[in-house]
Image (cartoon, rainbow, N blue to C red):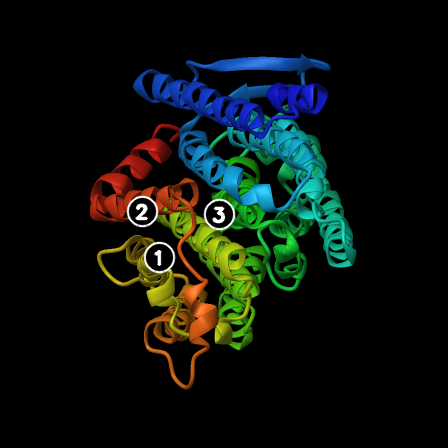
């Protein structure tokens, strides 16, 4: 965050100086973050902790790494520098780079703050800061569409945060006297007795409040419109930063706030699980009907984020592991797809799927990575999407919740729709139908290595993680079990 503010102050004129500053800042931040994660994992979950600002014995902005932090913090720390490298070339076409990369770096620090927050107050502080730091990124172009998308994003996010605040107030008043994350929840049984229904209502309000950023239906409308942002921003919004922050906050709310045991089997669980099931099908259906490439990927994110939320609403240990498994694999898949979409837009100016005839030949590297990511998103074994969906379905069966079986049906239907809306792009690119504008296609080619190398690395990393899915899932189980 400090390095981002420093870039606003320095305002370098040279692109080379700025690029070195931004890349070095991202790499150093990631190195420090991963070092903290490794030290914590090798020692004790309380090994690294600090208080940034103390207001009282109960209220403070503080950081501590636990099992859930290790997973989300690792995803952010690995992916952010790769997309930063990609964005350095991409943003040369957009202008106002000093402003863009300053907020880019600040947003990186804020997302890490969400990952490593020790309590709900710290999480809420960084959660609100994320809205304010990503707003200039969404509105970067400052044209009419960007301003409209920014206003919509701001209204949705601030309103959602207000509802999330309700849950935090109830946790403080009916809790054990603090807001620190505690696996199993922080409600005081004595204080909660007789107020169960009010607490469950507060949970539902907070779930949908945090769920705004996770694009839960019907509060998803900001996400497709935010696709007007520069593609590197879209990649981070959909894969690492905003929507994953919403899912991570919901994870904290269920398992570390109200407690899965308190909510399991109640009407509150039925309401939130039903919302996730509806969103899974709705997002996939809208993606199939959307011809704009980035908006199709956005509706795909709406659906896939609710895979994670559905797993979390199972309120079982298997549910949290299934949700985190899909969180990991979806991050690598979707960030690659958006970067591919950005390369297509930069090199051809085309944004609609029906304009991509024969692009598999014109942009072989971009569409090779896009195709692999498409199969991963569909869930073709042994790619990562399969492992995530399998773990979620397995947890749903084990939960013995009748509504969870409807969720499995939604996963199957969504997979069918995902096959249709992703393969329709791939087939059009490799097997064109009708006459082609050969002269225009001759001008289309893969981007410079500074853009396609990150694409190749992201794809390779996603495939490698998929081939090691047993180890990844074992690591996630270990991370979660550290707090039992």
Give the answer, above or below, for where 67 lies relative to 142: above
Residue under circle 2? 462
Give the answer, above or below, for where 62 lies relative to 232: above
Label pair 3/1, CB-CB below 8 angstroms: no
Of 199 and 432, nearer the camera is 432
Give the answer, above or below, for where 225 lies relative to 467: below
- Which image quarter: residue 448? top left
Q: Does residue 121 appear to the left or right of 69 in the view shown?
A: right
Return the disc, 2 or 3, that comes first in the chain's sequence. 3
Q: Secondary structure at mark 3?
A: helix
x then y, percent, for residue 130: 65, 37
Q: Secondary structure at mark 1?
A: helix
In the picture as drawn, the residue positioned furthest to the front comes out as 439
Q: Which mark is residue 239?
A: 3
- Which image quarter: residue 321? top left
**Residue for point 67% across, 49% down:** 209
Return the disc, 1 or 2, that comes first in the chain's sequence. 1
x then y, percent, for residue 218: 65, 64
Q: Which mark is residue 373?
A: 1
**Residue for point 75% across, 45% down:** 158
Count the marks: how many? 3
Label pair 1/2, CB-CB below 8 angstroms: yes
Q: Quadrant of the C terminus?
A: top left
x then y, percent, for residue 99: 69, 33
**Residue for point 26% across, 55% down:** 383
Please rate how many residues cluster around mark 2, counting C-alpha atoms within 10 Å: few if below 14, some from 14 to 19, many from 20.
many
Q: CA distance from mark 1 to mark 2?
A: 8 Å
- Which image quarter: residue 187? top right
Q: CA distance from mark 2 to mark 3?
A: 13 Å
**Residue for point 45% across, 24% down:** 27
């Amino acid at each position: 965050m400090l390095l981002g503010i420093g870039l606003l102050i320095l305002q370098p004129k040279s692109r080379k100086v700025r690029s070195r500053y931004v890349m070095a800042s991202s790499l150093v931040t990631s190195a420090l973050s991963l070092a903290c994660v490794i030290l914590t994992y090798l020692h004790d979950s309380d090994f690294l902790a600090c208080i940034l600002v103390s207001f009282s014995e109960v209220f403070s902005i503080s950081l501590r790494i636990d099992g859930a932090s290790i997973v989300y913090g690792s995803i952010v720390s690995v992916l952010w520098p790769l997309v930063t490298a990609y964005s350095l070339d991409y943003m040369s076409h957009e202008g106002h780079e000093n402003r863009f990369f300053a907020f880019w770096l600040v947003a990186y620090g804020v997302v890490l703050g969400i990952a490593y927050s020790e309590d709900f107050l710290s999480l809420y502080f960084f959660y609100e800061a994320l809205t304010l730091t990503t707003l200039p990124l969404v509105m970067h172009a400052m044209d009419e569409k960007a301003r409209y998308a920014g206003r919509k994003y701001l209204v949705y996010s601030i309103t959602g945060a207000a509802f999330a605040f309700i849950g935090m107030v109830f946790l403080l008043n009916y809790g054990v006297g603090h807001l620190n994350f505690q696996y199993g929840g922080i409600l005081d049984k004595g204080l909660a007795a007789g107020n169960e229904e009010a607490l469950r209502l507060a949970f539902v309000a907070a779930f949908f409040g945090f769920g705004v950023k996770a694009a839960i239906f019907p509060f998803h409308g900001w996400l497709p419109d935010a696709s007007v942002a520069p593609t590197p921003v879209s990649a981070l919004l959909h894969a690492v930063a905003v929507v994953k922050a919403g899912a991570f906050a919901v994870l904290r709310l269920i398992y570390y706030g109200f407690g899965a045991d308190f909510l399991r089997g109640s009407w509150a669980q039925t309401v939130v699980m039903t919302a996730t099931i509806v969103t899974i099908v709705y997002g996939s259906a809208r993606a199939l009907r959307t011809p704009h490439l980035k908006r199709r990927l956005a509706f795909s994110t709406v659906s896939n984020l609710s895979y994670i939320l559905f797993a979390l609403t199972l309120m079982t240990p298997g549910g949290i592991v299934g949700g985190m498994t899909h969180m990991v694999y979806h991050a690598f898949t979707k960030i690659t797809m958006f970067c591919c979409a950005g390369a297509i837009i930069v090199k051809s100016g085309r944004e609609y799927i029906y304009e991509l005839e024969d692009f598999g030949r014109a942009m072989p590297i971009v569409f090779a990575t896009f195709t692999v990511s498409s199969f991963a998103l569909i869930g073709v074994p042994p790619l990562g999407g399969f492992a995530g969906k399998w773990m979620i379905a397995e947890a749903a069966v084990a939960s013995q919740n009748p509504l969870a079986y409807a969720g499995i049906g939604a996963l199957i239907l969504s997979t069918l729709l995902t096959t249709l809306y992703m393969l329709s792009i791939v087939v059009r690119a490799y097997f064109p139908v009708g006459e082609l504008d050969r002269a225009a296609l001759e001008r289309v080619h893969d981007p410079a290595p500074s853009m396609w190398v990150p694409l190749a690395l992201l794809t390779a990393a996603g495939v490698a993680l998929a081939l090691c899915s047993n180890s990844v899932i074992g690591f996630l189980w270990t991370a979660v079990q550290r707090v039992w």
